[in-house]
Image (spheres, rainbow, N blue to C red):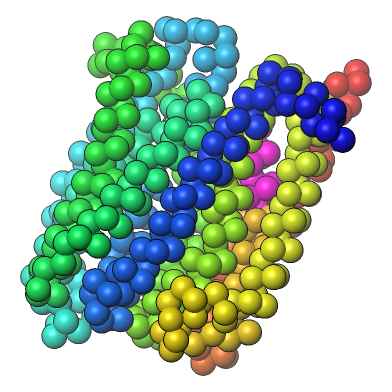
Amino acid sequence: MLNKLLAFYKEKDNKILVNNIAGTLLIKGIAMILTLFTMPVYIKYFEDKQAVGTWFSLVSVLNWILTFDLGIGNGLRNNLVSALSEKNDVLVKKLISSAYYFLGIVSLLLLVIGNICIGFIDVNGVFNISKDIFLPSVLRYCVRIVFSGIVLQFFLRIITSVLYAMRKTALSNLLTLISSASILLFVLIYQPEAMEDRLIVLSYAQVITTCLPLLITTIIIFMTVLKKNKPSVKSFDLTTGKQIMNLGVQFLSVQICLMIITSTNEILISRLSNVAFVVEYQAYYRVFYTVVTLFSLICQPMWSSFTQANVNKQYIWIKKTYRKFQLIAVGCSLLTVLLALVFDKIVVIWLGENVVQSSIVYSVTFSAFTIVSLLINTSSCLANGLNMLKCQVVWSIIGAILKIPLSMIFVKITGEWIGVVIANVTALLPLLFFQNLQNEKTLKKLNKSNNA
């Protein structure tokens, strides 16, 4: 067994993949531990569950913007893998320049239009928070700060797609670790007297800690390893841009739909139940979704590796690696069942007594949600790497359409916020079934092509 593992590791493609997975797991694992510590720190920072729930909802809603990059990031990633593999410096520069050009225009439009629209929105009504806790003027000001910062992050984050294409996944995840550590350190050290001041300074800290690492990394990468390929207006090419956009639009539709399904939970809970329950939801979510987050770290380098292998027509490698990947997903699924059994003990150790009321029904529901997410990530990784997105597009759209009405139905049936999570599972099941069906058919075709 040891000899087989060593032989597997010695192969060039496998070695790059394993090193990326190991480095990413280590870095992201530390980041996740910091994130778990962040929640009790936030509770202590605001000293009010509704205020904490408002902050979580605010960041969650505005983070939706990061998916509206027209799929440019993922479109660039898949196209860039081929160009880098062929060492075509001219095409690499065109791809990077065109991506930055398009995303720069979108970011500028978002910044202007978004800030105008915020002025007409009843922000307290959106987040279901009393004016006694946050004045509308203060909350609107903080929304503007976080929104502007996320638009900037939206533009700067394209460097992560470049890193993924270069198969430097661990470096990309190091940025998340730096951001998590920075925001935690800030909240621990600095705590203004007034509740509204705390929200304002935290908004600024959120912008700085997420954007600065991306900016510094962008400068370093284009001054060193990609010095010949740094973006320029002269290298913008409309045909190359369309090439990125054609693939990107499919990624975008999937991203938006999955965002509607999985990232609207906080706002739906606050609207259909009570904003204070967002804290309870976050406790369950952070514990169970830790497994998904860790698993996604394996998906990130796998995606680019599948793309690279497809370019090189390494079909046997694709099938063997995908089967191993599926076994890892099954192992992680069993771990979530264990978490459901011990969640009550974890939450007491983590947050203390009486902060969150644990329920075995809630734990089992989150376990089911986590398992479905794990299996979808597994099948999506192969589909994304091979540019097979039609199935995802169709069934993610159907799931997104069903999510909100299903949430309303299940919350009414259960009388509790957990109905929103049940709606997630129900909306995602068709995508899981049909995407796995598509993958198996594709693997059979690849196997036939290899034997031909």
Percent coordinates x, y for residue 388 in the rendering: 65, 37
Percent coordinates x, y for residue 130 in the rendering: 20, 84
User: Toward the viewer: 240 or 365?
Assistant: 365
Q: Quadrant of residue 185?
A: bottom left
Residue located 52% across and 8% down the image? 87
Percent coordinates x, y for residue 209 in the rendering: 26, 47
* Above/below status of 365 relative to 357: above
User: Residue 385 colored magenta?
Assistant: yes
* Above/below status of 368 relative to 386: below
For residue 387, say whether it is visible: no
User: Magenta segment, which residues?
Assistant: 376-390
User: Toward the viewer: 429 or 334?
Assistant: 334
128 to the left or right of 33 = left
Secondary structure of the magenta portion, mostly? helix
Residue located 54% across and 26% down the image? 167
- In the rendered image, the quadrant that contains the N terminus is top right
* Above/below status of 326 relative to 90: below
Percent coordinates x, y for residue 50 in the rendering: 28, 81
* Above/below status of 235 relative to 411: above
Residue located 74% across and 63% down the image? 334
283 to the left or right of 137 = right
Residue sticking out furthest to the right: 451
User: Toward the viewer: 255 or 161?
Assistant: 161
For residue 26, say whether it is visible: yes
Q: Quadrant of residue 56?
A: bottom left
User: Residue 222 colored magenta?
Assistant: no
247 to the left or right of 198 = right
- In the rendered image, the quadrant that contains the C terminus is top right
Residue located 70% across and 70% down the image? 337
